[in-house]
Structures are given as C-alpha cells and as structure tokens.
Amino acid sequence: MSVITSGIIDGLVWLIHACYLLCHNYWIALFLFTFLTKVILLPLSVWVQKNSIKTVKMQPEMNHIKATYWGNQDMISEEQYKLFKKEKYSPFADLIPLFVQLALLMGVVEAVKKGTPLTAIPAQAHGATLIVPLLAALSAFIMCYVQNKINVLQVEQGAWNKYGTMAFSVALSLYLGFFVSIGVGIYWTYSNLLSVLQLVLLNIWINPRHYIDYEALEKSKEELKKTQEFMTAGKKEDKKNPYRKKELEDYKRFLKVPGKKVVFYSEKNGFYKYYKNIIEEIIRRTNIVVHYITSDPQDEVFQMEGEQFKPYYIGDKRLIVLMMKLETRIMVMTTPDLENFQLKRSYVKKDIEYIYVPHDVNSSNLTFHENALDHFDTIFASGFKNKEEIEEREQKFGLPAKRIVEWGSSVIDNMTVSYEAMEQEETAEGKDQKTILIAPSWQRDNIMDSCIEQMLDELVQMPYHIIVRPHPQYVRHFEEKLKALAQKYAEKGVEVQMDFSSNKTVYTADLLVTDWSSIAFEYAFSTLKPVLFINTPMKVVNPNYKELTSVPVDIELRDKVGISLEENALDGLRPAVEKLLFDNQFSRDSLRRMKEQYIYNVGNSGKVGAEYIINRLVEMQKKS
C-alpha cells in the first residue's frame, strides 16, 4: 500500500515539476497543476453532476412518498428504497468523489513539500504568508456562494444546510490555510475558483433543466408542506396536553383488566363503522366485555362507553409497546402488515388469535403489500374473490393455512340500509333530473389531475345534474384549484362539493364516475346503480400481484357493475352514460344478482362475524 501511495505522490511531484518547466514560476505552475487535476478528474465531476441531477429529478416522487406516508418512517423508507432501485441510484455513491478529493489533497500536501519551495507554514512564518489563508477562505466563500445559486443539488437545500456548509467550508479553509504550507493553500484557492468555472460550464453542457421537471418539483414541495402543516397542527405535545394524561391513564387501565376476551383496534375516528355490526351483535347476544383501543383521543367511541363496551385511547408510539404486552384471547384489527412494521404480535401471550377485518371489498393482493396478511390467524373475507386469492397465495408460497370466514361487508350492509331509507324520502319528494356524481380517488394521476375538464366539457352537454366530489385529501391539498374549477363551470350548472359532512350526494346520484376508488363497489352494491370507470393509472401497491392467477376483484368487477373508458377515449362518454342509465344490463335486478354473487352474507355480515368470535371464545374456554 505504501508503494502505491509513494508512486502517486511521485507522479504528482513529476506533474508539478513539468508545469514549472513550462513557466519557471511556482505560483503559475501550481495553477497549471490544479487545472490539470481538474481535467484528469473531469469524468468524476461529470458523474457527480449527473448524479446530482438524478437526485433532484427523484425529489418530486420523494416528496410525494413523504406526504403520502407521513409519520410512517418504515413505509417511507421502503418506498424510497423501491424508487432508488428503479432509478438505479445509490446515496452512498455520493461519498466516492469526497474520498477521491481527500486522497488527492493528502497527496498534494506531500507533493508540494517535495516538489516546490513553497513550504512555509503561515502559522509559523507569519508576515506576507498570512495572506494565503485569507485567500483560501475567500475562495471557499466564493465557491459556496456560487454553488448555493446554481449547483443543481445545493439550490434545493434549506437555508441552514446552504449557509451552514458555507460557514464550515470558510472556517475549514481558513484554519487549514494557517497550518499547511503556502503551496497547499495556493492549490486550495486555485481549486475552489476553478470549481466555480467548472460548475458554470457543466451547467451549460449538462443543463439540469433539460432533465428535471421543476414545475412538478414545486408542486411536490407544496404538497409536502401542506401535509406537514396539516399533520402537525395541534399535535405539538407539551406537559399540559390533556391527551397525554388520558393516554397514560387508559394505558394503565387497560393493562390492569384481567382475563380480557376480545379486543378491537381502530387507527382513528370513523373506523368503528367497520366493526359496528359485529360489536353490537356480540353485546346483544352475550355478556362479553368488548375492549376497544383507538389511537384517536377524540374518537366518537368514547361517547358509547358502557358495561360491555370499554374504549381506551392509546397513541401510536405507546401502542407499539402495548401490542407487545397484549393479553387477550382474540385481537381484531383493520390494520394490515401485522409483524411487518411497527405493530407486532404479543411477546407475552403467544396463542392470541389475530383477526383481520377489511375496510372494503377490494383485492388485498393488489392494494396491499404482498405479505400484508400473512401473520394473521383469521381473515374475514368480503367475497369469494378475496378468499380465492388468499388460499392461492398460501398454496403457492407454502404459508400456514389461515381460517377464512365467509363474512361479507358491514359497510355495504349499513350503506344499503341508509340508502333504502333515503330512497323512500327521495321518492316522496320527487326528482326531475338524473344526477351524475364524479368521485375520484386520491391516488396519483387521478381524474382530477388527468382529465376532469375534458370530462366536464362532455357531460355538461347532457341534460343531467353534474356533481364533482373530490376525495377529502385532494380538497385539503388543492383547495384553490377546486375553487377555480367550480367558478369555471358554475354557469353550466356543475356543482363542486368540498363539504363531506353528509353522504346524501353519494346515495342519491344515479350514476357514479370514478377511477380506482373503493367507493365504486360500495356505491354499486348499496344503491344497485352502475359505475362509469375511467382507466387512469391503476393503484398497485403489490407490483407482484400477477404471481397469482386469481384476477383481482378490482379489475374483474369493473366491466360487470359498469363500463370502463380509457383516458384517451372520452369521446365515448355520452354513449357510455346513456347505456349505464337506461340499459337493462345495468338494472337494479342485474346489480343485485352481481352483489349476491360477489359479496358474502348480504345484510348479515354482523351476525356472521359475531357468531364466529363468540364460537371461538367458547372453544378457547373449553380448552383452557
């Protein structure tokens, strides 16, 4: 190793001497030497420029990931890893140029000592040599200033990073300038100034604006900023925060309860609807106490506390510990990815039965991570398609067989009851005009982002009432855009709704237009009315979903409960709307038969779910 190092230093000495022979002036010779090292390392500088551009090019997607999975660092890391893999980018590769520069600098220190008479050290020699550290510091300031203005990566850094780096570079240059030879200080100064010239030329040669969508970048920054503001609003905890006290009290209270039989977990307010029918049936038929954990301190369930229903507020961080200590016979969750991320199976009681209850009828193979349900013992399946793909996955990958309960959908059951009551009111009041409801998803490239105005231009020519009801998350992020849309189409009778306090619009619409939103099947199966699907880019969480032969229900049902149109085929909007509204293929009877085929136990999901839990508790009691 020492032979290689010695050889590199000898080579640098030779290069300095060759430069000196050209001009017979060591100051000029060091400039030529520095210039030649820049030329030699040009391929590395080009690589750094391209890598920096790639980093910034990925930033819109990175910001979108952070906004989408705010607060879930595991998911953010996983999605970023996928992005890096797709773009063939390694953040560690950025360290290579730094190591090369440091190695070169150490070599130059020795080469200047051996190859030039410029060996005086300002800290020892004083006098005129003291100007060299000042020049080194000034050159570092100039270099950092220019980088902050035009370096593709540095421009995107925050003020603290920009000016912190500048202060560090200037201070380091000044400090080193005092304690290395003036020759090295001169080299350092030349290197900084030539770096400025090189950066300007590289920006012309490999212009970042040819590769980076700066408009998308700014939009993603705004999206992330709004997400941050929304998610942190009112959540800055301090010692006087009443929820912290409540959380600690509820945590202790929960752990003190002996012999818990069944526990339900809810991520936030509003999730009770997924359990409502099951819990109410358990309470009606038995004396079992239902323990209900929620991570929302303002969950409506606290108003429902009674002898058989005990709610507890446990925040996300404390929940991790509680889950590890959990003691119950049955744990019911709507949260997938048990064991995969922060929520683990109990370390204390190994025989707890973990039950997964779905939010919707959609495919878990398509819309979840591929192993999202692998660590549950029991799955409540919405329909035969859900059961089919779970069983195929178990067989294909040799997974332990889970209990699959042919359950149904409490959400659809309850929506059906609400709709039928509302339908009677609507019939009594009378209705002169049919209503078309546009309700897109929140995923990227949804209808609102891709084709809403083109659709509205077609739909307003028809004799129907048009309502646009974006996803609540979309309203939160793009309120001004929606206000502009509402103003543009107000005179044409289009209504843009941004108030979600009532679902009456969803129930009373005669036709739903959406993309990949789960509302499609809830609407179709609760109102028995058809859906017009726009084929925007499909939401795929599991890129390996095609490993199973079972076609995801999200795809299979699209052309059974409605009609699908490509984004570039919206000229077919009018005939599709007319067919959906008036063709017997999409009549109530037809959609009712489809519902009974694809959804288990229509109207009885609560009874089926409760019976399963009650029977399992009886079996467990007999074994204990």
Image (cartoon, helix red, strand yellow):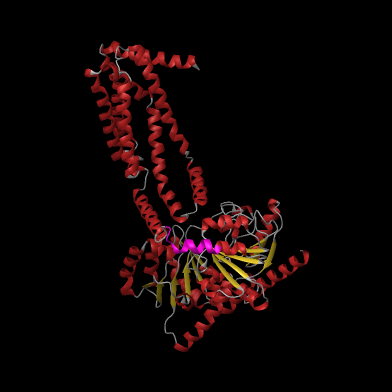
Residue 216 in percent (x, y) is at 37, 51
Residue 229 is at least partly visible in this image: yes
Q: Residue lying furthest left in this view? A: 128
User: Which image quarter: residue 472?
Assistant: bottom left
Look at 50% across and 47% down and name the residue there: 77
User: In the current view of this chain or complex, which residue is farthest to the right?
Assistant: 623
593 or 237, which is in the foreground? Answer: 237
Q: Is residue 583 above or below residue 47?
A: below
Residue at position x 38%, y 53% in the image: 220
Rendered position, 489 above or below 368: below
Measured from the top left, where is residue 257 in percent x and y? 63, 65
Image quadrant in which you'd find residue 605: bottom right
Dominant SS of magenta comes to: helix
Residue span colored magenta? 238-250
Q: Is residue 586 visible?
A: no
Report if residue 242 lies within the magenta region. yes
Q: Nearer the viewer, residue 231 or 221?
A: 231
451 in magenta = no
Q: Quadrant of the C terminus?
A: bottom right
Residue at x 74%, y 65% (from the top left corner): 620
